[in-house]
Image (cartoon, helix red, strand yellow):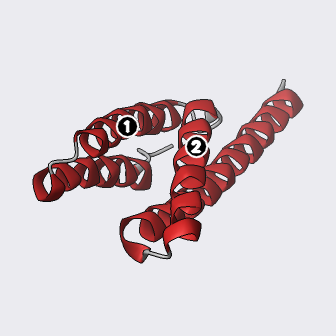
Amino acid sequence: MPADILGYIYAATVAAGGVLGYVKAQSIPSLGAGLIFGSVLGYGAYQTSQDPTNIRVSIAATTLLGGIMGYRYYNTGKIMPAGIIALLSCLVFVKTIVRSFTATALINETLSKESKTT
C-alpha cells in the first residue's frame, strides 16, 4: 500500500496550527498540544503506511482530538480552529477506517487465491 499522504498532511496541519497559535497569541498550551498531537498523528500515519490494518494510534489520536475540538466548537461556535479541526478529524477517521477495511479485503483475497493454487 502507498504512504498515508492524507494522514501526514493532517499531522502537519495540526502541528502547524499549534505553532500558529503560539505565534499569534503566545499560547504555550496551543503549541504543546499541537506539537504533541501532530507527532502522534505523524507516527500513526507512518504505522498505517507500513501496515494499513494497524490503525490503533491513528484512530485513538484522531478521535481524541476530534472530540476535544468538537466540544470546543459546540461551546464557542467558532469555526476556526475548533470547527475546522473537528471536521478534518471526522474525514481522517472515516478515511482511516475505509483504508483499513480495503486493505483487509485485499489481504483476504490474496490469501484465498494462494490457498487455491497450493
Give the mark toward the camera: 1 or 2. Answer: 2
> Looking at this rendering, what residue extends furthest in the front direction?
75
Q: Residues within 10 Å of mark 1 (few under 14, many from 20)?
A: many
In the displayed structure, 27 sits above or below 32; it is below
Marks 1 & 2, CB-CB < 8 Å contact: no
Q: Residue at x 65, y 35 (%)?
A: 53
Q: Earlier in the sequence, mark 1 or mark 2?
A: 1
> Closer to the camera, 49 or 77?
77
Residue type at tag 1? Gly
| Quadrant housing the C terminus | top right
Q: For residue 118, which numbered disc appears in the image?
A: none
Element at label 2: helix
Coordinates of residue 38 in the picture (x, y in percent) = 35, 40
Q: Is residue 54 left or right of residue 16?
A: right
Secondary structure beneath label 1: helix
Describe residue 60's horizontal placement relative to residue 12 as left or right.
right
Neighbour tally class for label 2: few under 14, some 14-19, many 20 plus, Cα within 10 Å: some
Residue that mark 1 sits on: 42
Badge 2 amino acid: Leu
Q: How many angstroms separate mark 1 from mark 2 (CA)?
A: 15 Å
> Image quadrant of residue 59?
top right
Q: Give the residue at mark 2.
A: 64
Q: Position of residue 93 (x, y in %)?
A: 60, 54
Q: Residue at x 50, y 76 (%)?
A: 77
Residue 75 to residue 19: above or below: below
Pick whichever, 90 or 25, lies toward us. Answer: 25
